[in-house]
Image (cartoon, rainbow, N blue to C red):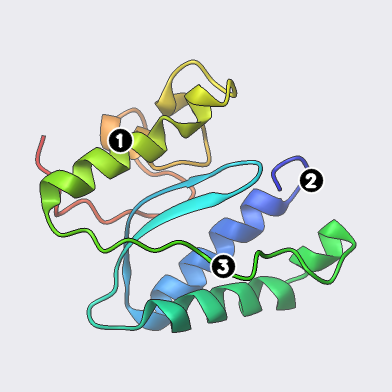
């Protein structure tokens, strides 16, 4: 996914658009070359609708054109309901280390397409705004 110029930018644009449209909040994210992770506070909104519209928005913005194919998405996505803030913190840390485990960077905060630096205080704002009110250091 990430080896084609413009893909991560379009993912960020689409997520921001859907977050604004649904008034949802993004707690954390990471864009990887083959997949993405999103942690959303949905305020009662259906995840299926968010994902459907997220994929549709990307298709309309030409992501499929970048890939020169009509199908860029898997038919399904995995979802997990996070039942505590402690568990959310563990999961957020896990996804932030994806680029390190994949050998893309040495430190999680070095991966631009992640919310890791937002949490580690390394930069003021990443490419996609994150909701950190749930998080206490």
Task: From this view, report whether residue 112 is shown above or below residue 18.
Answer: above
Residue at 74 percent of width and 63 percent of height: 72
Residue at 65 percent of width and 45 percent of height: 34
The reply to whether discs 3 and 1 touch (Cβ–Cβ < 8 Å) is no
User: How many dots with numbers?
Assistant: 3
Residue 39 located left or right of residue 8: left
Residue 62 located left or right of residue 41: right
Which residue is the site of mark 3? Answer: 14
In the rendering, at what x and y percent does residue 37 appear? Answer: 46, 51
* Distance Cα–Cα, label 2 vs label 3: 17 Å
Closer mark to the observer between disc 1 and disc 2: 1
Task: From this view, report whether residue 54 is shown above or below residue 106.
Answer: below
Which residue is the site of mark 2? Answer: 4
In the rendering, at what x and y percent does residue 134 appear? Answer: 14, 53
Which residue is the site of mark 1? Answer: 93
Q: Secondary structure at mark 2?
A: loop
């Amino acid at each position: 996914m990430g080896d084609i110029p413009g893909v991560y930018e379009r993912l960020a644009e689409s997520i921001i658009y859907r977050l604004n449209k649904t008034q949802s909040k993004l707690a954390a994210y990471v864009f990887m070359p083959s997949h993405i992770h999103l942690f959303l506070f949905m305020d009662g909104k259906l995840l299926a609708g968010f994902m459907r519209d997220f994929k549709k928005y990307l298709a309309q913005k030409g992501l499929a054109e970048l890939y020169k194919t009509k199908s860029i998405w898997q038919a399904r996505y995995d979802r997990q309901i996070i039942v505590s803030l402690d568990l959310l913190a563990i999961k957020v840390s896990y996804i932030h280390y994806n680029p390190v485990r994949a050998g893309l960077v040495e430190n999680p905060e070095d991966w631009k397409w992640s919310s890791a630096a937002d949490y580690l205080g390394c930069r003021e704002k990443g490419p996609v705004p994150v909701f950190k009110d749930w998080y206490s250091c």
